[in-house]
Amino acid sequence: MRPGAAVLLVSSSLLSLAVAPSGPPPLPERMADTGGGTQLITAQASRTSSTKGTVTWWDRRDGRWVKAGSVAARFGAKGLVEGGSRRQGTNTTPTGLYDLPYAFGIKAAPGGTRTPYRRVHQKSWWCQDNNSRAYNRWTEPRAADCRASESEHLISYPTQYAYALVIGFNYERPVRGRGAGIFLHVNGRGATAGCVSVPGDAMRRIVKWADPARRPHIAIGTGRGATVITRY
């Protein structure tokens, strides 16, 4: 080999890398708001009528968003709708950016879980009764003014609520009739009643990953293809 040949090969390789086209920025970089923390979950469907999509969880490191995991997801049986105009009982998933108040589950918290975790018991209910003072809240036992027919008996869903995260939709200051009990939980048999669902192993990993010190949020929305975000 002539002196300098190896240098020429390396230089050519570097030139190729320099002119190679770069892909689109990570999804969080294309969002107007990510909640201000360093952890983010994106739940993206291709259009508002979709019942399937993708959930991806991200870490912000050294000023960049880095993908930590991604799985197929399910949405409401009637698709997605803007959170501020959603109506209860419509089987739609609310779009928007929300915090994640705490996790819960029928199973014990995965080892190393840092987010607050509430264990489901026989007396655990989620009140969805618009006439109850406990509307859109966990109640244990069920509140006296919250009808059982207008509530979820959490332990009755051993698959879906093996692990779950509360999505802060209509949670801090609940608006009656807008909706209650919107969670990120384990897949059931099909589309949800408005929640976002993922496979069980992924849900377990997400619960263990979430760190309240890093202010995690979830952004639910739609995109055209995989590049342009149209609603968050």
Image (cartoon, helix red, strand yellow):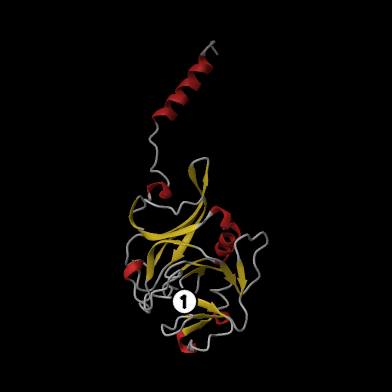
Give the residue drawn at x 45%, y 81%: 128
| Residue 93 in which image quadrant | bottom left
Q: Which is more toward the observer, 3 or 100? A: 100
| Residue 106 in which image quadrant | bottom right
- Residue 68 lies, in percent from the top left, at 53, 51
**Is residue 55 toward the left or the right of residue 51 in the image?**
right
Give the residue drawn at x 56%, y 82%: 156
Above or below: residue 125 compared with residue 45:
below
Q: Which residue is mark 1?
A: 136
Position of the C terminus, as image quadrant, is: bottom left
**Type of the residue with mark 1:** Asn
Whether residue 163 is visible: no
Above or below: residue 215 compared with residue 124:
above
Position of the N terminus, as image quadrant, is: top right
- Residue 230 lies, in percent from the top left, at 31, 56
Give the residue drawn at x 55%, y 61%: 202
